[in-house]
């Protein structure tokens, strides 16, 4: 293998080895308690010896009223076998309680590879999949979940949203972010040989290494979550008239039109004008507040987004796809439209 390909693979593998902390998992899963009842939960990128997904679902098996928990261990050595650990209740606080089933790899896939036949059989048996999949395989991982029509709650890098495979799923309301991670700084444990380069890393008293990620991590799910019923302007499903709103009317200079899209620019989610009827370009982080009851997504200002809706909005065929304001490029934006604009005169808000 060429040296720089080796380096790239090594880098991808290192980025794949981020272990999720217990509290990151429990903070999110608590929002789905009802939805877990009677479900078969599958963690398909998790070594049960150390995975906190296994620990969380095992120790909450009874209280979540789960039916079955399955975890598969990925074998790094080609040709070696691996195992699934399966738990059906009985001794929730003994992490070793459960039974093992040997699994093999096939073709190019090692034993325990989520794409291997044995793991796909377990996937078919499961009803909710949850894990932190390897970042380098995230898109393939999500495609497989859709192929098998699974419910899921998985953790990943928010940059995945800017890809041509993942963004359309958000647009079509087939995937959205989970409830708990919307820009917070969180830690992942990393392998002992992980190079810790700066102050955003930490070693605990036992010598375990951690890396801190500033705001770029999200849960990705297709399970129902509360914030999607509220979005920006609603609380408990009702229009929230206790908050102040931003208006386009009278503040046109704050929201300039793009040179290359038929849309206005909005720099911060909270500044989205409630009265604007046309298309607005908003930061990617707007997805943290996205409710399909309030907005529809038109597209993303990216070269790969060539839908007919986008071609109607795009006014310049120049090679640049990022929005331009008076010739100056701004960050990539999501283009959205307010489904129920409220004029300044009509607004009963604060
Ligand atoms: C980001 S880590 C997360 C581990 C664990 N799910 C957690 O959250 O702590 C991804 C894990 O997937 C495993 N893995 C890598 N390639 C895999 C594959 N093709 N199929 C299944 N698991 C894989 C790696 O061993 C790695 O530990």
Image (tube, rainbow, N blue to C red):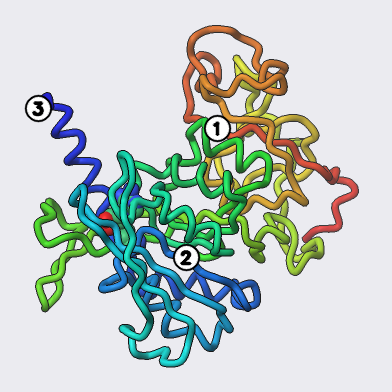
Disc 3 secondary structure class: helix
Point out the image quarter for the C terminus. bottom right
Disc 2 secondary structure class: strand
- Residue 307 position within the rendered picture, expressed as x and y whole percent measured from the top left: 66, 22
Q: Are marks 3 and 2 in contact (CB under 8 Å)?
A: no
CB at mark 2 closer than 8 A to ligand 1?
no
N-terminal of the pair, mark 1 or mark 3, is 3
Instruction: Give how far apart the Cα atoms at labels 1 and 3 are.
Output: 36 Å
Instruction: Give how far apart the Cα atoms at labels 3 and 2 are.
Output: 37 Å
Q: Nearer the viewer, mark 3 or mark 2?
A: 2
Q: Which label belongs to residue 333?
A: 1
Disc 1 secondary structure class: loop
Quadrant hosting residue 261: top right
Mark 1: give few (<14), some (14-19) or many (20+) Cα within 10 Å.
many
Look at 72% across and 17% down and name the residue there. 312
Q: Nearer the viewer, residue 222 or 87?
A: 87
- Residue 109 position within the rendered picture, expressed as x and y whole percent measured from the top left: 32, 44
Look at 56% across and 79% down and name the residue there. 66
User: Residue tagged by mark 3?
Assistant: 3
Instruction: Give how far apart the Cα atoms at labels 1 and 2 are.
Output: 35 Å
CB at mark 3 closer than 8 A to ligand 1?
no
Q: Which label belongs to residue 42?
A: 2
Residue 149 visible at all: yes
Residue 182 visible at all: no
Mark 3: give few (<14), some (14-19) or many (20+) Cα within 10 Å.
few
N-terminal of the pair, mark 3 or mark 2, is 3
N-terminal of the pair, mark 1 or mark 2, is 2
Quadrant hosting residue 265: top right
- Residue 135 position within the rendered picture, expressed as x and y whole percent measured from the top left: 35, 46
């Amino acid at each position: 293998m060429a040296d720089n390909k080796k380096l790239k693979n090594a880098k991808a593998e290192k980025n794949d080895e981020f272990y999720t902390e217990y509290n990151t998992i429990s903070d999110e899963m608590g929002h789905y308690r009802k939805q877990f009842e009677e479900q078969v939960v599958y963690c398909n990128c998790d070594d049960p010896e150390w995975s906190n997904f296994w620990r969380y679902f095992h120790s909450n098996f009874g209280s979540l009223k789960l039916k079955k928990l399955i975890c598969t261990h990925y074998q790094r050595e080609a040709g070696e076998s691996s195992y699934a650990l399966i738990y059906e209740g009985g001794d929730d606080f003994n992490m070793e309680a459960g039974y093992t089933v040997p699994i093999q790899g096939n073709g190019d896939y090692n034993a325990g590879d989520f794409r291997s036949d044995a793991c796909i059989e377990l996937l078919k048996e499961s009803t909710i999949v949850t894990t932190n999949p390897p970042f380098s395989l995230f898109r393939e991982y999500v495609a497989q979940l859709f192929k098998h029509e699974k419910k899921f709650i998985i953790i990943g890098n928010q940059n995945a949203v800017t890809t041509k495979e993942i963004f359309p799923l958000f647009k079509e309301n087939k995937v959205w972010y989970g409830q708990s991670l919307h820009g917070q700084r969180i830690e992942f444990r990393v392998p002992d040989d992980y190079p810790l380069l700066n102050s955003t890393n930490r070693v605990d008293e036992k010598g375990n290494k951690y890396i801190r990620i500033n705001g770029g991590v999200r849960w990705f799910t297709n399970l129902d979550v509360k914030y999607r019923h509220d979005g920006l302007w609603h609380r408990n499903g009702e229009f929230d008239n206790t908050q102040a709103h931003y208006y386009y009317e009278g503040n046109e200079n704050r929201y300039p039109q793009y040179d290359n899209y038929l849309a206005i620019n909005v720099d911060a989610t909270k500044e989205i004008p409630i009265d604007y009827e046309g298309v607005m370009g908003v930061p990617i982080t707007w997805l943290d507040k996205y409710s399909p009851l309030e907005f529809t997504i038109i597209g993303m200002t990216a070269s790969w987004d060539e839908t007919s809706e986008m071609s109607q909005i795009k006014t310049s065929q120049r090679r640049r796809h990022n929005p331009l304001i008076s010739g100056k490029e701004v960050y990539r934006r999501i283009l959205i439209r307010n489904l129920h604009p409220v004029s300044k005169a009509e607004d009963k808000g604060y």
